[in-house]
Protein backbone atom coordinates (compact mmCIF):
# COMPACT_ATOMS: atom_id res chain seq x y z
CA UNK A 1 0.00 0.00 0.00
CA UNK A 2 1.29 3.44 -0.96
CA UNK A 3 2.08 5.48 2.17
CA UNK A 4 0.58 8.89 2.80
CA UNK A 5 2.85 11.89 3.14
CA UNK A 6 2.89 15.64 2.61
CA UNK A 7 5.58 18.04 1.45
CA UNK A 8 3.77 21.13 2.73
CA UNK A 9 5.31 22.97 5.67
CA UNK A 10 2.57 25.20 7.02
CA UNK A 11 4.53 26.24 10.11
CA UNK A 12 7.72 27.05 8.19
CA UNK A 13 7.96 30.57 9.57
CA UNK A 14 8.08 29.35 13.15
CA UNK A 15 10.55 26.62 12.18
CA UNK A 16 12.87 29.13 10.47
CA UNK A 17 12.67 31.39 13.52
CA UNK A 18 13.56 28.61 15.95
CA UNK A 19 16.12 26.79 13.83
CA UNK A 20 14.01 23.66 13.36
CA UNK A 21 14.16 21.60 10.18
CA UNK A 22 11.85 22.64 7.33
CA UNK A 23 12.43 19.32 5.56
CA UNK A 24 10.00 16.44 6.20
CA UNK A 25 11.24 13.03 7.41
CA UNK A 26 11.90 10.33 4.81
CA UNK A 27 9.00 8.21 3.63
CA UNK A 28 11.11 5.04 3.78
CA UNK A 29 13.59 5.31 6.64
CA UNK A 30 15.57 2.17 5.75
CA UNK A 31 16.24 3.42 2.22
CA UNK A 32 17.22 6.84 3.58
CA UNK A 33 19.64 5.26 6.08
CA UNK A 34 21.28 3.19 3.35
CA UNK A 35 21.77 6.25 1.12
CA UNK A 36 23.07 8.42 3.94
CA UNK A 37 25.59 5.74 4.94
CA UNK A 38 27.08 6.16 1.45
CA UNK A 39 26.82 9.94 1.10
CA UNK A 40 28.05 10.72 4.60
CA UNK A 41 31.38 8.98 3.89
CA UNK A 42 32.22 11.10 0.84
CA UNK A 43 35.08 13.48 1.56
CA UNK A 44 35.24 17.23 1.05
CA UNK A 45 38.71 17.73 -0.35
CA UNK A 46 38.81 21.53 -0.25
CA UNK A 47 38.06 21.65 3.51
CA UNK A 48 40.82 21.47 6.09
CA UNK A 49 41.63 17.85 6.84
CA UNK A 50 39.32 16.57 4.09
CA UNK A 51 36.44 15.69 6.44
CA UNK A 52 33.52 13.56 5.36
CA UNK A 53 30.12 14.97 4.46
CA UNK A 54 28.77 13.56 7.69
CA UNK A 55 31.44 15.33 9.73
CA UNK A 56 31.48 18.72 8.00
CA UNK A 57 27.89 19.49 7.01
CA UNK A 58 25.01 20.82 9.05
CA UNK A 59 21.91 18.66 9.77
CA UNK A 60 19.97 20.14 6.83
CA UNK A 61 22.20 18.26 4.38
CA UNK A 62 21.32 14.92 5.96
CA UNK A 63 17.64 15.89 6.09
CA UNK A 64 17.68 16.77 2.39
CA UNK A 65 19.49 13.60 1.33
CA UNK A 66 17.22 11.40 3.43
CA UNK A 67 14.07 13.07 2.10
CA UNK A 68 15.18 12.60 -1.52
CA UNK A 69 16.63 9.10 -1.35
CA UNK A 70 14.12 7.98 1.27
CA UNK A 71 11.25 8.62 -1.15
CA UNK A 72 12.23 5.59 -3.25
CA UNK A 73 9.85 2.66 -2.91
CA UNK A 74 11.89 -0.53 -3.41
CA UNK A 75 8.77 -2.66 -3.88
CA UNK A 76 7.32 -0.64 -6.75
CA UNK A 77 10.53 0.86 -8.13
CA UNK A 78 8.87 4.27 -7.93
CA UNK A 79 10.35 7.45 -6.49
CA UNK A 80 7.49 9.19 -4.72
CA UNK A 81 9.15 12.62 -4.53
CA UNK A 82 10.19 13.47 -8.08
CA UNK A 83 11.10 17.14 -7.79
CA UNK A 84 13.02 18.96 -5.07
CA UNK A 85 13.42 22.74 -4.99
CA UNK A 86 16.13 24.11 -2.70
CA UNK A 87 16.63 27.85 -2.20
CA UNK A 88 19.61 28.51 0.03
CA UNK A 89 22.05 31.34 0.66
CA UNK A 90 25.51 31.46 -0.87
CA UNK A 91 28.45 29.78 0.91
CA UNK A 92 26.24 27.06 2.39
CA UNK A 93 28.11 24.23 0.59
CA UNK A 94 25.71 24.22 -2.33
CA UNK A 95 28.24 22.94 -4.92
CA UNK A 96 29.51 20.31 -2.49
CA UNK A 97 25.97 19.12 -1.77
CA UNK A 98 25.22 19.03 -5.50
CA UNK A 99 28.23 16.86 -6.21
CA UNK A 100 27.58 14.57 -3.25
CA UNK A 101 23.88 14.05 -4.03
CA UNK A 102 24.55 13.12 -7.63
CA UNK A 103 27.58 10.95 -6.90
CA UNK A 104 25.54 9.06 -4.31
CA UNK A 105 22.80 8.58 -6.91
CA UNK A 106 25.37 7.13 -9.30
CA UNK A 107 26.72 4.73 -6.64
CA UNK A 108 23.26 3.49 -5.61
CA UNK A 109 21.88 3.22 -9.15
CA UNK A 110 20.90 -0.20 -10.47
CA UNK A 111 19.92 0.74 -14.03
CA UNK A 112 22.46 -0.23 -16.69
CA UNK A 113 23.87 2.71 -18.68
CA UNK A 114 21.82 5.16 -16.67
CA UNK A 115 22.58 8.84 -17.02
CA UNK A 116 22.81 11.44 -14.27
CA UNK A 117 23.31 15.09 -15.09
CA UNK A 118 24.27 18.26 -13.26
CA UNK A 119 22.90 20.97 -15.54
CA UNK A 120 24.55 24.35 -15.08
CA UNK A 121 23.79 27.66 -16.80
CA UNK A 122 27.42 28.41 -17.74
CA UNK A 123 30.70 26.57 -18.17
CA UNK A 124 32.12 28.29 -15.08
CA UNK A 125 29.25 27.12 -12.87
CA UNK A 126 29.59 23.65 -14.39
CA UNK A 127 33.23 23.57 -13.30
CA UNK A 128 32.21 24.53 -9.76
CA UNK A 129 29.72 21.66 -9.67
CA UNK A 130 32.01 19.04 -11.20
CA UNK A 131 35.09 19.60 -9.05
CA UNK A 132 33.65 18.41 -5.70
CA UNK A 133 32.31 15.16 -7.24
CA UNK A 134 35.62 14.48 -9.02
CA UNK A 135 37.62 15.09 -5.85
CA UNK A 136 35.33 12.85 -3.79
CA UNK A 137 36.15 9.97 -6.10
CA UNK A 138 39.88 10.73 -6.12
CA UNK A 139 40.05 10.83 -2.30
CA UNK A 140 38.49 7.38 -1.85
CA UNK A 141 40.48 4.32 -2.99
CA UNK A 142 37.39 2.14 -3.26
CA UNK A 143 35.56 4.74 -5.35
CA UNK A 144 38.64 5.25 -7.53
CA UNK A 145 38.55 1.56 -8.42
CA UNK A 146 34.79 1.66 -9.01
CA UNK A 147 34.61 4.89 -11.03
CA UNK A 148 36.33 6.13 -14.17
CA UNK A 149 36.89 9.89 -14.14
CA UNK A 150 37.20 11.67 -17.49
CA UNK A 151 38.07 15.27 -16.73
CA UNK A 152 38.18 16.43 -20.35
CA UNK A 153 34.46 15.71 -20.80
CA UNK A 154 33.50 16.22 -17.13
CA UNK A 155 32.12 12.71 -16.81
CA UNK A 156 32.31 10.07 -14.07
CA UNK A 157 31.40 6.53 -15.17
CA UNK A 158 30.47 3.56 -12.98
CA UNK A 159 32.63 0.65 -14.26
CA UNK A 160 30.06 -2.03 -13.31
CA UNK A 161 26.76 -0.54 -14.48
CA UNK A 162 28.27 1.74 -17.13
CA UNK A 163 26.08 4.51 -15.72
CA UNK A 164 27.59 7.97 -15.78
CA UNK A 165 27.38 11.38 -14.17
CA UNK A 166 27.85 14.28 -16.56
CA UNK A 167 28.15 17.97 -15.85
CA UNK A 168 26.74 20.01 -18.72
CA UNK A 169 26.60 23.73 -19.38
CA UNK A 170 23.41 25.01 -20.96
CA UNK A 171 25.33 27.53 -23.03
CA UNK A 172 27.09 24.67 -24.82
CA UNK A 173 23.78 23.54 -26.40
CA UNK A 174 24.30 19.89 -25.40
CA UNK A 175 21.12 19.23 -23.42
CA UNK A 176 19.01 17.85 -26.23
CA UNK A 177 18.19 14.14 -26.27
CA UNK A 178 19.11 13.43 -22.64
CA UNK A 179 17.77 10.14 -21.21
CA UNK A 180 18.54 10.92 -17.60
CA UNK A 181 17.49 9.13 -14.43
CA UNK A 182 18.42 12.08 -12.25
CA UNK A 183 19.03 15.76 -13.02
CA UNK A 184 20.32 18.45 -10.69
CA UNK A 185 19.78 21.99 -11.99
CA UNK A 186 22.41 24.24 -10.44
CA UNK A 187 21.81 28.00 -10.00
CA UNK A 188 18.25 27.97 -11.30
CA UNK A 189 18.03 31.76 -10.88
CA UNK A 190 20.51 32.21 -13.76
CA UNK A 191 18.33 30.07 -16.03
CA UNK A 192 15.52 32.53 -15.27
CA UNK A 193 17.49 35.21 -17.11
CA UNK A 194 18.23 33.01 -20.15
CA UNK A 195 16.02 33.03 -23.20
CA UNK A 196 14.28 29.75 -24.09
CA UNK A 197 15.10 28.11 -20.74
CA UNK A 198 11.61 26.64 -20.55
CA UNK A 199 12.04 24.87 -23.90
CA UNK A 200 15.52 23.71 -22.93
CA UNK A 201 14.21 22.19 -19.68
CA UNK A 202 11.42 20.46 -21.56
CA UNK A 203 14.03 18.89 -23.83
CA UNK A 204 16.37 17.94 -20.98
CA UNK A 205 13.65 16.47 -18.74
CA UNK A 206 11.86 14.46 -21.43
CA UNK A 207 13.70 11.23 -20.67
CA UNK A 208 12.44 11.11 -17.07
CA UNK A 209 8.99 10.04 -18.26
CA UNK A 210 10.19 6.46 -18.79
CA UNK A 211 12.21 6.28 -15.56
CA UNK A 212 9.94 5.79 -12.55
CA UNK A 213 12.87 6.23 -10.15
CA UNK A 214 13.84 9.51 -11.83
CA UNK A 215 14.14 12.86 -10.07
CA UNK A 216 14.97 16.53 -10.58
CA UNK A 217 16.65 18.72 -7.96
CA UNK A 218 16.67 22.49 -8.38
CA UNK A 219 19.46 24.00 -6.27
CA UNK A 220 19.81 27.77 -6.27
CA UNK A 221 20.50 30.99 -4.44
CA UNK A 222 18.18 33.97 -4.71
CA UNK A 223 18.50 36.20 -7.77
CA UNK A 224 20.12 39.64 -7.53
CA UNK A 225 17.24 40.92 -9.65
CA UNK A 226 13.48 40.41 -9.29
CA UNK A 227 12.80 36.72 -10.10
CA UNK A 228 11.84 36.01 -13.68
CA UNK A 229 11.34 33.21 -16.20
CA UNK A 230 11.62 29.58 -15.11
CA UNK A 231 13.09 30.62 -11.77
CA UNK A 232 10.03 32.67 -10.89
CA UNK A 233 7.73 29.87 -12.05
CA UNK A 234 9.41 27.27 -9.84
CA UNK A 235 9.81 29.64 -6.88
CA UNK A 236 6.13 30.62 -6.95
CA UNK A 237 5.10 26.97 -7.29
CA UNK A 238 7.40 25.88 -4.46
CA UNK A 239 6.01 28.54 -2.13
CA UNK A 240 2.44 27.50 -2.96
CA UNK A 241 3.21 23.83 -2.21
CA UNK A 242 4.97 24.78 1.03
CA UNK A 243 2.01 26.94 2.10
CA UNK A 244 -0.57 24.29 1.24
CA UNK A 245 -2.14 26.31 -1.58
CA UNK A 246 -1.17 23.55 -4.02
CA UNK A 247 -1.21 19.89 -2.98
CA UNK A 248 1.63 18.12 -4.76
CA UNK A 249 3.34 15.47 -2.59
CA UNK A 250 5.73 14.66 -5.46
CA UNK A 251 7.25 18.15 -5.17
CA UNK A 252 9.41 19.00 -2.14
CA UNK A 253 10.04 22.72 -1.45
CA UNK A 254 13.01 23.58 0.78
CA UNK A 255 13.12 27.36 1.00
CA UNK A 256 15.42 29.08 3.46
CA UNK A 257 13.90 32.57 3.52
CA UNK A 258 12.77 35.02 6.18
CA UNK A 259 9.25 34.98 7.60
CA UNK A 260 6.99 37.53 5.92
CA UNK A 261 6.67 39.78 8.97
CA UNK A 262 10.47 40.06 9.24
CA UNK A 263 10.66 41.17 5.61
CA UNK A 264 7.93 43.76 6.13
CA UNK A 265 9.51 45.13 9.33
CA UNK A 266 13.05 45.16 7.98
CA UNK A 267 14.29 42.67 10.60
CA UNK A 268 15.61 40.56 7.72
CA UNK A 269 18.26 43.21 7.04
CA UNK A 270 19.89 42.81 10.47
CA UNK A 271 23.09 40.81 10.61
CA UNK A 272 22.11 39.05 13.83
CA UNK A 273 19.26 37.34 11.95
CA UNK A 274 21.31 36.07 9.00
CA UNK A 275 21.63 32.60 10.53
CA UNK A 276 17.99 31.91 9.64
CA UNK A 277 18.75 31.69 5.93
CA UNK A 278 22.23 30.22 6.39
CA UNK A 279 21.60 26.69 7.74
CA UNK A 280 25.30 25.80 7.32
CA UNK A 281 26.41 28.60 9.65
CA UNK A 282 29.16 27.33 11.92
CA UNK A 283 30.22 24.86 9.24
CA UNK A 284 31.02 26.39 5.82
CA UNK A 285 30.04 29.94 6.77
CA UNK A 286 30.31 31.92 10.01
CA UNK A 287 28.88 35.11 11.45
CA UNK A 288 32.20 36.94 11.26
CA UNK A 289 32.41 36.24 7.52
CA UNK A 290 28.90 37.58 6.96
CA UNK A 291 29.70 40.72 8.96
CA UNK A 292 32.84 41.42 6.93
CA UNK A 293 31.06 40.86 3.63
CA UNK A 294 28.18 43.07 4.71
CA UNK A 295 30.50 45.94 5.61
CA UNK A 296 32.36 45.63 2.29
CA UNK A 297 29.12 45.56 0.31
CA UNK A 298 27.71 48.51 2.25
CA UNK A 299 30.86 50.56 1.58
CA UNK A 300 30.85 49.64 -2.12
CA UNK A 301 27.37 51.10 -2.73
CA UNK A 302 23.79 50.01 -3.18
CA UNK A 303 24.36 47.63 -6.04
CA UNK A 304 26.81 45.58 -3.98
CA UNK A 305 24.58 45.71 -0.90
CA UNK A 306 21.61 44.51 -2.89
CA UNK A 307 23.68 41.62 -4.23
CA UNK A 308 24.85 40.72 -0.71
CA UNK A 309 21.29 40.67 0.67
CA UNK A 310 20.10 38.50 -2.21
CA UNK A 311 22.97 36.02 -2.06
CA UNK A 312 23.70 35.81 1.67
CA UNK A 313 20.27 36.51 3.15
CA UNK A 314 18.02 35.11 0.40
CA UNK A 315 16.08 38.37 0.34
CA UNK A 316 14.04 38.66 -2.82
CA UNK A 317 14.91 41.87 -4.62
CA UNK A 318 11.91 44.17 -4.56
CA UNK A 319 11.41 47.90 -4.75
CA UNK A 320 13.16 49.35 -1.74
CA UNK A 321 16.83 48.37 -1.61
CA UNK A 322 18.45 51.22 -3.58
CA UNK A 323 19.29 54.64 -2.20
CA UNK A 324 18.63 56.24 -5.59
CA UNK A 325 15.20 54.60 -5.83
CA UNK A 326 12.07 56.61 -6.40
CA UNK A 327 10.56 57.45 -2.99
CA UNK A 328 7.12 56.22 -4.12
CA UNK A 329 8.53 52.70 -4.52
CA UNK A 330 8.60 52.35 -0.72
CA UNK A 331 4.81 52.62 -0.63
CA UNK A 332 3.87 51.08 -3.96
CA UNK A 333 3.25 47.49 -2.90
CA UNK A 334 1.18 48.41 0.18
CA UNK A 335 -1.20 50.42 -2.03
CA UNK A 336 -2.14 47.46 -4.20
CA UNK A 337 -5.85 46.77 -4.55
CA UNK A 338 -6.62 43.44 -6.23
CA UNK A 339 -10.22 44.52 -6.91
CA UNK A 340 -9.16 47.28 -9.30
CA UNK A 341 -9.70 46.43 -12.96
CA UNK A 342 -10.24 48.52 -16.04
CA UNK A 343 -13.92 47.58 -16.03
CA UNK A 344 -14.47 48.38 -12.35
CA UNK A 345 -12.87 51.80 -12.74
CA UNK A 346 -15.32 52.79 -15.46
CA UNK A 347 -18.23 52.65 -13.00
CA UNK A 348 -16.37 53.51 -9.81
CA UNK A 349 -14.82 56.86 -10.83
CA UNK A 350 -16.29 60.28 -11.54
CA UNK A 351 -13.51 61.58 -13.79
CA UNK A 352 -10.51 60.15 -15.66
CA UNK A 353 -7.15 61.34 -16.92
CA UNK A 354 -4.98 59.21 -19.19
CA UNK A 355 -1.21 59.24 -19.65
CA UNK A 356 0.65 57.71 -22.60
CA UNK A 357 4.41 57.25 -23.00
CA UNK A 358 6.91 55.34 -25.11
CA UNK A 359 6.16 53.39 -28.20
CA UNK A 360 9.51 53.33 -29.96
CA UNK A 361 10.75 50.11 -31.51
CA UNK A 362 13.15 49.78 -28.58
CA UNK A 363 10.63 50.80 -25.92
CA UNK A 364 7.45 49.69 -24.31
CA UNK A 365 4.28 51.61 -25.03
CA UNK A 366 2.75 52.51 -21.69
CA UNK A 367 -0.80 53.65 -20.95
CA UNK A 368 -1.98 54.69 -17.49
CA UNK A 369 -5.49 55.64 -16.41
CA UNK A 370 -6.00 57.58 -13.18
CA UNK A 371 -9.54 57.98 -11.94
CA UNK A 372 -11.02 59.76 -8.92
CA UNK A 373 -13.35 57.61 -6.85
CA UNK A 374 -16.87 59.04 -6.81
CA UNK A 375 -17.38 58.29 -3.12
CA UNK A 376 -13.98 58.39 -1.39
CA UNK A 377 -12.28 60.87 -3.77
CA UNK A 378 -9.20 58.62 -3.66
CA UNK A 379 -7.16 58.20 -6.83
CA UNK A 380 -7.24 54.85 -8.58
CA UNK A 381 -4.86 53.76 -11.34
CA UNK A 382 -4.67 51.01 -13.92
CA UNK A 383 -2.00 50.52 -16.54
CA UNK A 384 -1.27 48.50 -19.64
CA UNK A 385 1.80 48.08 -21.82
CA UNK A 386 2.69 46.94 -25.32
CA UNK A 387 5.92 45.81 -26.95
CA UNK A 388 7.03 45.05 -30.47
CA UNK A 389 8.81 41.76 -31.19
CA UNK A 390 11.95 43.83 -31.78
CA UNK A 391 12.04 44.73 -28.06
CA UNK A 392 12.28 41.03 -27.19
CA UNK A 393 15.10 40.43 -29.65
CA UNK A 394 17.02 43.56 -28.68
CA UNK A 395 16.56 43.10 -24.93
CA UNK A 396 17.35 39.40 -24.62
CA UNK A 397 18.30 39.82 -20.96
CA UNK A 398 14.68 40.80 -20.25
CA UNK A 399 13.02 38.41 -22.72
CA UNK A 400 11.86 35.92 -20.08
CA UNK A 401 10.60 38.71 -17.84
CA UNK A 402 8.55 40.19 -20.72
CA UNK A 403 7.09 36.74 -21.38
CA UNK A 404 6.04 36.56 -17.71
CA UNK A 405 4.28 39.92 -17.98
CA UNK A 406 2.63 38.79 -21.19
CA UNK A 407 1.18 35.71 -19.45
CA UNK A 408 -0.20 38.05 -16.78
CA UNK A 409 -2.01 40.01 -19.58
CA UNK A 410 -0.45 43.34 -18.53
CA UNK A 411 1.97 43.39 -21.45
CA UNK A 412 0.75 42.79 -24.99
CA UNK A 413 3.33 41.49 -27.48
CA UNK A 414 1.97 42.90 -30.73
CA UNK A 415 2.42 41.12 -34.04
CA UNK A 416 2.59 44.22 -36.19
CA UNK A 417 4.04 47.67 -35.70
CA UNK A 418 1.13 50.03 -35.18
CA UNK A 419 -1.10 47.54 -33.38
CA UNK A 420 0.00 49.02 -30.06
CA UNK A 421 -1.11 52.53 -31.01
CA UNK A 422 -4.42 51.15 -32.30
CA UNK A 423 -5.13 49.29 -29.04
CA UNK A 424 -4.20 52.37 -26.97
CA UNK A 425 -6.67 54.42 -28.97
CA UNK A 426 -9.38 51.80 -28.50
CA UNK A 427 -8.99 51.91 -24.71
CA UNK A 428 -9.02 55.70 -24.73
CA UNK A 429 -12.22 55.59 -26.78
CA UNK A 430 -13.92 53.35 -24.22
CA UNK A 431 -13.04 55.84 -21.47
CA UNK A 432 -14.15 58.79 -23.63
CA UNK A 433 -17.50 57.15 -24.31
CA UNK A 434 -18.24 57.09 -20.57
CA UNK A 435 -18.41 60.87 -20.70
CA UNK A 436 -15.91 61.09 -17.82
CA UNK A 437 -12.67 61.76 -19.70
CA UNK A 438 -10.89 64.93 -18.68
CA UNK A 439 -7.72 64.85 -20.81
CA UNK A 440 -5.10 62.60 -22.36
CA UNK A 441 -1.48 63.56 -21.67
CA UNK A 442 1.23 62.44 -24.08
CA UNK A 443 4.98 62.94 -24.27
CA UNK A 444 5.23 65.61 -27.01
CA UNK A 445 7.97 63.63 -28.79
CA UNK A 446 5.59 60.75 -29.37
CA UNK A 447 2.48 62.77 -30.09
CA UNK A 448 2.28 62.35 -33.87
CA UNK A 449 1.14 58.75 -34.44
CA UNK A 450 -0.90 58.64 -31.25
CA UNK A 451 -2.73 61.87 -32.14
CA UNK A 452 -3.72 60.44 -35.51
CA UNK A 453 -5.00 57.21 -33.95
CA UNK A 454 -7.02 59.08 -31.31
CA UNK A 455 -8.55 61.36 -33.91
CA UNK A 456 -9.51 58.34 -36.01
CA UNK A 457 -11.41 57.12 -32.97
CA UNK A 458 -13.29 60.43 -32.82
CA UNK A 459 -11.61 61.74 -29.68
CA UNK A 460 -11.55 65.57 -29.90
CA UNK A 461 -8.14 67.14 -30.36
CA UNK A 462 -8.73 69.49 -27.41
CA UNK A 463 -8.77 66.43 -25.14
CA UNK A 464 -5.16 65.64 -26.05
CA UNK A 465 -2.24 67.66 -24.71
CA UNK A 466 1.52 67.32 -24.58
CA UNK A 467 3.08 66.77 -21.16
CA UNK A 468 6.59 68.19 -20.89
CA UNK A 469 9.12 65.72 -19.52
CA UNK A 470 12.29 66.23 -17.48
CA UNK A 471 12.21 68.74 -14.63
CA UNK A 472 8.71 69.90 -15.58
CA UNK A 473 7.42 66.50 -14.45
CA UNK A 474 8.85 66.88 -10.93
CA UNK A 475 5.53 68.07 -9.54
CA UNK A 476 3.74 64.96 -10.78
CA UNK A 477 6.44 62.71 -9.37
CA UNK A 478 6.17 64.33 -5.93
CA UNK A 479 2.38 64.29 -6.03
CA UNK A 480 2.32 60.60 -6.90
CA UNK A 481 4.67 59.58 -4.11
CA UNK A 482 2.78 61.73 -1.53
CA UNK A 483 -0.56 60.23 -2.56
CA UNK A 484 0.88 56.73 -2.20
CA UNK A 485 2.44 57.52 1.18
CA UNK A 486 -0.83 59.04 2.46
CA UNK A 487 -2.82 56.02 1.33
CA UNK A 488 -4.88 58.25 -0.96
CA UNK A 489 -3.88 56.51 -4.19
CA UNK A 490 -4.47 52.87 -5.07
CA UNK A 491 -3.42 50.80 -8.06
CA UNK A 492 -4.23 47.49 -9.67
CA UNK A 493 -2.17 44.41 -8.85
CA UNK A 494 0.17 44.48 -11.87
CA UNK A 495 3.70 43.05 -11.51
CA UNK A 496 4.97 44.99 -14.52
CA UNK A 497 4.30 48.25 -12.68
CA UNK A 498 6.11 47.02 -9.57
CA UNK A 499 9.05 46.17 -11.82
CA UNK A 500 9.00 49.63 -13.41
CA UNK A 501 8.87 51.28 -9.97
CA UNK A 502 11.91 49.27 -8.97
CA UNK A 503 13.71 50.38 -12.16
CA UNK A 504 13.08 54.09 -11.60
CA UNK A 505 16.16 56.03 -10.47
CA UNK A 506 16.07 59.58 -9.19
CA UNK A 507 18.43 62.21 -10.58
CA UNK A 508 19.04 65.35 -8.46
CA UNK A 509 18.38 68.57 -10.35
CA UNK A 510 18.87 71.68 -8.22
CA UNK A 511 16.32 71.49 -5.42
CA UNK A 512 14.23 68.92 -7.25
CA UNK A 513 14.62 65.35 -8.43
CA UNK A 514 13.87 63.88 -11.83
CA UNK A 515 13.14 60.40 -13.10
CA UNK A 516 14.31 59.85 -16.64
CA UNK A 517 14.61 56.91 -19.00
CA UNK A 518 18.25 57.79 -19.50
CA UNK A 519 19.00 57.35 -15.79
CA UNK A 520 17.24 53.96 -15.75
CA UNK A 521 19.37 52.71 -18.66
CA UNK A 522 18.16 49.47 -20.21
CA UNK A 523 15.55 48.99 -17.46
CA UNK A 524 12.12 49.99 -18.71
CA UNK A 525 9.94 52.60 -16.98
CA UNK A 526 7.62 53.69 -19.83
CA UNK A 527 4.36 52.64 -18.05
CA UNK A 528 5.49 54.52 -14.94
CA UNK A 529 6.19 57.64 -16.99
CA UNK A 530 2.69 57.28 -18.45
CA UNK A 531 1.36 57.21 -14.89
CA UNK A 532 3.20 60.45 -14.06
CA UNK A 533 1.61 62.04 -17.14
CA UNK A 534 -1.85 61.05 -15.91
CA UNK A 535 -1.08 62.20 -12.36
CA UNK A 536 0.03 65.58 -13.72
CA UNK A 537 -3.43 66.08 -15.18
CA UNK A 538 -5.36 64.68 -12.20
CA UNK A 539 -3.40 66.95 -9.83
CA UNK A 540 -5.12 69.92 -11.53
CA UNK A 541 -8.29 68.68 -9.79
CA UNK A 542 -10.55 68.32 -12.82
CA UNK A 543 -14.27 68.80 -12.28
CA UNK A 544 -16.33 65.68 -11.88
CA UNK A 545 -18.03 65.01 -15.17
CA UNK A 546 -19.77 61.79 -14.38
CA UNK A 547 -23.48 61.60 -13.76
CA UNK A 548 -24.71 63.20 -10.56
CA UNK A 549 -26.39 61.29 -7.77
CA UNK A 550 -29.83 62.53 -8.89
CA UNK A 551 -29.20 61.37 -12.47
CA UNK A 552 -28.17 57.89 -11.36
CA UNK A 553 -31.32 57.44 -9.24
CA UNK A 554 -33.88 58.59 -11.75
Image: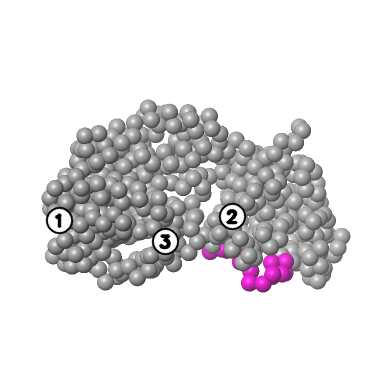
Residues packed near mark 2 inside 10 Å, few (<14), some (14 to 19) or many (20 plus): many
Of pointers 2 and 3, the one earlier in the residue sequence: 3
User: Which residue in the structure is indicated by mark 2?
Assistant: 496
Look at mark 1 in the image and give the residue it sits on: 146
Residues shaded magenta:
406-423
Measured in 3D between alpha carbons, the distance from the residue under mark 1 to the one under mark 2, in whole angstroms, is: 53 Å
Image position of 523 (left or right of 224): right
Place residue 282 in its image quadrant. top left
> Do the residues bearing badges 2 and 3 touch, measured as CB atoms within 8 Å?
no
Q: Is residue 98 magenta?
A: no
In the rendered image, residue 420 lying in the magenta stretch gets the answer yes
Q: Earlier in the sequence, mark 3 or mark 1?
A: 1
Judged left or right of residue 347, residue 142 is left
Q: Nearer the viewer, residue 153 or 201?
A: 153
Question: How far is mark 2 from mark 3, CA to CA?
Answer: 32 Å
Q: CA distance from mark 3 to mark 1?
A: 29 Å
Q: Is residue 48 visible?
A: yes
Query: Considering only order in the chain, which callout, 2 or 1, is on the residue closer to the N terminus?
Result: 1
Q: Is residue 450 above or below residue 25?
A: below
- For the point 81% across and 63% down, the residue is 448
Q: Position of residue 309 (x, y in %)?
A: 46, 38
Q: How many marks?
A: 3
Residue bearing the label numbered 3: 172
Element under label 3?
Answer: helix
Instruction: State whether residue 267 is above or below residue 34.
Output: above
CA neighbours of label 1 inside 10 A, class few (<14), some (14 to 19), many (20+): some
Task: Kindly give the residue lying farthest to the front in the view shown.
Answer: 152
Amino acid sequence: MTPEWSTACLDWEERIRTGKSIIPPPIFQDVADEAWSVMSELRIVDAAGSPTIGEACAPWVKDLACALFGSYDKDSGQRLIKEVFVLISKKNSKSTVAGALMLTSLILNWRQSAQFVILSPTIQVADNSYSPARDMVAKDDELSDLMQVQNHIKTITHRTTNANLKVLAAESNTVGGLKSVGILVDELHLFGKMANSENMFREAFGGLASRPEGFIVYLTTQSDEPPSGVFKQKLDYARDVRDGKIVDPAFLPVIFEFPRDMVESGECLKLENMWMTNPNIGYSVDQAFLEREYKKADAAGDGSLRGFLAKHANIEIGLNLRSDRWAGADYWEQQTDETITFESMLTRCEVFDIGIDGGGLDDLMGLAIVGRDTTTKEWISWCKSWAHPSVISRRKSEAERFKDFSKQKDLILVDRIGDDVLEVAQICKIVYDTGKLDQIGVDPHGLGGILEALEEHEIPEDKIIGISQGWKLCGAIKTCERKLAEGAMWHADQPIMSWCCGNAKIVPSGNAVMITKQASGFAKIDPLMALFNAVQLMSLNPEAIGKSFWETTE
